[in-house]
Amino acid sequence: MTTIKEIAKACNVSVATVSNVFTGKGRVSEERRQFILQTAQKMNYVPNDLARSLKQRSGRTIGIITEDLTVFNCPNIVDGIHEYLETIDYTYILGNLRLFQKYDNNFYHHEEYATKVAEEFQIMKSKQVSGIIYVGAHNRTIRSIPQDFGLPIVITYGKSASPQMISVNYDDERGAYDAVSELLKEGHTRIGLVAGEADSMHTVERSRGYRRSLLDHHVPYDESLIYQGAWTRDSGYAAAKALIAQKVTALFCMNDVMVAGVYDYADKHNIIIGKDLSVIGFDNRDICTILKPELSTIALPLNALGAHSARLLIDMIANPEEMQIPRDLKIPCRLIRRASTCISAS
């Protein structure tokens, strides 16, 4: 790759003169400027805009490390970070680990996982970022974040094993509570729960919200109305088969993908969603408005997670000794009512 020094030598001028031509600074005659630009073009010189930008914005750049940008939650979180940074004239460098694409859904058990994360943190430090936001692909306890790293770090869509590190998540428990409360307000008392994988933090928190809502509305908890799914469409189908046999009038599914399986079962057995059976999902994915009837669900505040994470990180950078904030900040979800629920006929 051609360098400024090589161009200066070819033009018999100083490196500073060449630099002034590319940056628009200093006094260079038009004749000499054109000669330098033509020489640079012949030598296939490509200006290092990234390096120049970083130099100009020294101290106003953060790093974002995503575990996998293709996982559904990540793009909107990054967009929320970007949106906030624009308002304060900060920029960011994005590092995408692609862990899901490389190692599948259980990537955090892979032997190379911790090494990849550590390497990316060092890369960010070498680029002289002022702080780092780590975006998880699964909401879980993340044990790979380096301790005493020397830069402010905020985790979103996950939490650190260290109680000293700040994390920003959405309120899983409250989201589930609101979903079940909506069904209870419609008169349903036999509400089946289509749960995710048992060891998932989402499952644990959403199960707690389900039970707390029943308790607050004086409805007995019935373990026979719980089906342990696996976040998949097939497990939603199996759950519908098992729970409808238990005479449920409503289902709360812990994600929208499993709801699609419930719809498959209902369609095959002439059960009308929104009339014979009420259904609420979780996540507010694109499939919600494709399903017929459209699905009531809990919307995740992904953009807000990104914006809050960015605000906290910038506050940490600006006032490292004055931060008095919760270590685990939770952002509320939002219930979206559509046509998949109805008043109980019983």
Image (tube, helix red, strand yellow):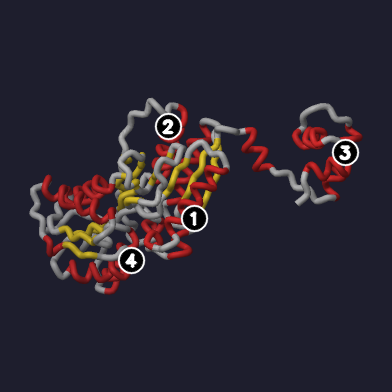
Residue 232's label in the rendered image is: 4
- Front residue (pair 265, 317): 317
How far across and down, in percent of the image, does residue 216 sit? Answer: 12, 45
| Disc 3 and disc 2 in contact, CB within 8 angstroms | no
Q: Quadrant of the C terminus?
A: bottom left
Indicate left or right for 20 with 96 as reference. Answer: right
Between disc 4 and disc 2, the foreground one is 2
Instruction: Using the rendered image of the protein, determine whether residue 329 is visible from the camera's viewpoint.
Output: no
Residue occupying image coordinates x 32% and y 44%: 162
Location of residue 263 (image quadrant): bottom left
How far across and down, in percent of the image, does residue 343 sit? Answer: 18, 53
Distance of mark 4 from mark 2, alpha carbons?
39 Å
Q: Tell me the element at label 2.
A: helix
Q: Residues within 10 Å of mark 4 (few under 14, many from 20)?
A: some
**Relative to 81, does residue 74 appear above or below in the rendering?**
below
Distance of mark 3 from mark 2, alpha carbons?
46 Å
The earlier-in-sequence mark between 2 and 1 is 1
| Disc 4 and disc 2 in contact, CB within 8 angstroms | no
Q: Residues within 10 Å of mark 1 (few under 14, many from 20)?
A: some
Distance of mark 3 from mark 1, alpha carbons?
43 Å
Q: Tell me the element at label 1.
A: loop
Between disc 3 and disc 1, the foreground one is 1
Residue at the far bottom in the pictured view: 268
Residue at image mark 1: 97
Q: Tell me the element at label 4.
A: loop
The earlier-in-sequence mark between 3 and 2 is 3
Between disc 4 and disc 3, the foreground one is 3
Between disc 1 and disc 4, the foreground one is 1
